Image: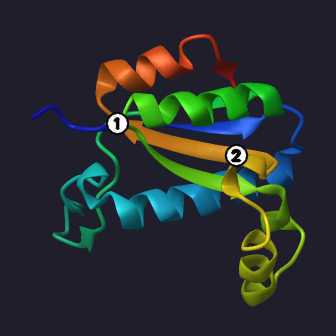
Amino acid sequence: MQAPRCAIILHSDLAPGKATNAAAVIALTLGQRHPALVGEPLQDADACPFPGLIPYGIPVLAASHEEMDAMRSRCAEAVCDLVLFPEEGQATTDYAALRAAMSETPAREWRLLGMALVGEKQSVRKLTAKLKLFS
């Protein structure tokens, strides 16, 4: 079986600090959900061990709310795993409050600031082909 591929998509209007935060939160969740994405441990010349890094690139792409909504729908058909980062994720530092707020709205209605998708290489490329790099 081919190694899974992933991409992170951020809302194109996010300020740099907000975008960095969203990407970091999404990346932590990706590593937890998909440990196969993490490469073998590294070692320096003094035999000091370091945690492995992902062995291939993760594109960080830009999209509008509409593009993310459309991609979210298409990911189910493409059998891709999704990590969603809703606006409310940056509205509070109280995780219990975030969970409570999100439980009141169906996921299809969440306004996304970011998302990641993981799946077969061709599926991920097809879903993200029209998106530009986040800048």
- In this view of the protein, which residue sits in the foreground, 11 or 39? 11
Residue 34 seen in the current view: yes
Q: Is residue 34 left or right of residue 112?
A: left
Q: Amino acid at mark 1?
A: Gly
Residue at the spot x=61%, y=29% of the render? 71
How many marks the image carries: the answer is 2
Binning the other alpha carbons within 10 Å of mark 1 as few (below 14), some (14 to 19) or many (20 upward) gives many
* Residue denoted by label 2: 114
The residue sitting at the left extreme is 1
Q: Is residue 33 left or right of residue 93?
A: left
* Residue denoted by label 1: 119
Q: At which x and y percent is residue 121?
A: 31, 25
Residue at the spot x=64%, y=29% of the render? 61
Binning the other alpha carbons within 10 Å of mark 2 as few (below 14), some (14 to 19) or many (20 upward) gives many
Picture quarter with the C terminus: top right
- Mark 1: secondary structure: strand
Q: CA distance from mark 1 to mark 2?
A: 17 Å
Picture quarter with the N terminus: top left
Residue 57, numbered label: none
Q: At which x and y percent is residue 57?
A: 41, 33
Q: Is residue 111 above or below residue 61?
A: below
Q: At which x and y percent is residue 50?
A: 29, 68
Q: Are marks 1 and 2 in contact (CB under 8 Å)?
A: no
- In this view of the protein, which residue sits in the foreground, 66 or 105? 105
Res. 18 image quadrant: bottom right
Residue at the spot x=58%, y=56% of the render? 26
Residue at the spot x=79%, y=72% of the render? 104
Q: At which x and y percent is residue 85?
A: 69, 55
Residue 60 seen in the current view: no
Q: Amino acid at mark 2?
A: Gly
Q: Is residue 113 left or right of residue 129?
A: right
- In this view of the protein, which residue sits in the foreground, 107 or 18? 107
